Amino acid sequence: MPFIRETIVTTRHASGDTHIAPMGVRERGRELIVAPFRPSATLENLQRDGCAVINYPDDVRVYAGCLTGRRDWPVCDAERIPVMRLRDCLAHTEIEVARMENDELRPRFHCRIVHEATHAPFHGFNRAQAAVIETAILVSRLHMLDDEKIDAEIAYLRIAVDKTASGREREAWAWLMAAIAAHRHRPSRPTP
Ligand SMILES: Cc1cc2nc3c(=O)[nH]c(=O)nc-3n(C[C@H](O)[C@H](O)[C@H](O)COP(=O)(O)O)c2cc1C
């Protein structure tokens, strides 16, 4: 199985605006692989520009926020590529696409590292942060999951949040719980 880092990928829209999206990035030696499902703004931007920034924030509100319509996180210039990075991240990696492996469902961008920098110390793992990221992934897949599966996962992940969260993780958790509730109460589609 590949080693996957759950990161925040920033890319540039054709308009010049920054696009911010959580993405799992696979490591293969010095090569990093970004694999967005179609359709995806990250995919379009990577295809057009051929570069992106992989950001490593410890504020998990960015992950939960992007999944719940809160994509407006502070950004600043990267060093070597014309894409903005998250201003508040522990570290970031600037990448260029070396080759694209096309696929109808999920193309893969094989990328080389052009620059890396560290901005703040890593202070260790936190269970609530891991639980928020896991729940954000769950929220990105709500359309594929039944209520029983969602409830079981939430019941388990909530334990770590209740025991170990700071205010940031609690806020992120609340956004995700609201998204799950909204998903459940969405108007059902009229039957044809
Ligand atoms: C931790 C995490 C990892 C994710 N990894 C991926 C991924 O590797 N590929 C993908 O297509 N979506 C992934 N998602 C879901 C996307 O972030 C989400 O669907 C997003 O809107 C992608 O579309 P966009 O590029 O148009 O923003 C992930 C979500 C989370 C919370």
Image (spheres, grey):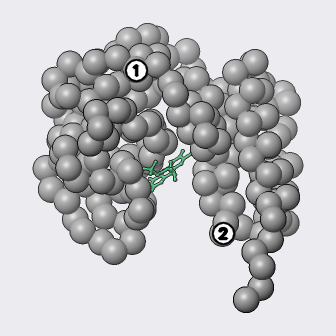
Dot 1: element: strand
Q: Position of residue 49 (x, y in %)?
A: 19, 44
**Figure quadrant of the N terminus:** bottom left
Q: Is residue 168 visible?
A: yes
Q: Secondary structure under badge 2?
A: helix
Which residue, given by chain and number where applicable, does mark 2 sit on?
144
Within-10-Å neighbours for mark 2: few <14, some 14–19, many 20+? few
For residue 30, say whether it is visible. Answer: no
- In the image, taking residue 45 as reference, residue 163 lies left or right, namely right
Q: Residue at x 26, y 48 (%)?
A: 46
For badge 1, the amino acid type reads Val
Q: Nearer the viewer, residue 13 or 60?
A: 13
Query: Where is 123 relative to 10, above or below?
Result: above
Of 142 and 159, which appears nearest the observer? 142
Is 17 displayed left or right of 7 in the figure? Answer: left
- Observer-nearest of 133 and 37: 37
Q: Which residue is tagged 1?
A: 75
How many residues crowd around disc 1 within 10 Å: few (fewer than 14), some, or many (20 or more)? Answer: some
Q: Nearer the viewer, residue 118 or 22?
A: 22
Using residue 6 as the reference point, say whether residue 169 is left or right of it. right
Residue 63 x %, y %:
57, 36
Amino acid carrying mark 2 in the image = Met
Count of marks, rendered view: 2
* Direction from residue 125 to residue 21 in the image, left or right: left
User: Percent from the top left, x then y, of residue 191?
Assistant: 77, 85
Q: CA distance from mark 1 to mark 2?
A: 32 Å
- On screen, residue 120 above or below 24: above
The residue located at (55%, 15%) in the rendering is 123
Quadrant of image for the C terminus = bottom right
Name the residue: 56% across, 39% down.
66
Q: Earlier in the sequence, mark 1 or mark 2?
A: 1
Mark 1 vs mark 2, foreground winner is 1
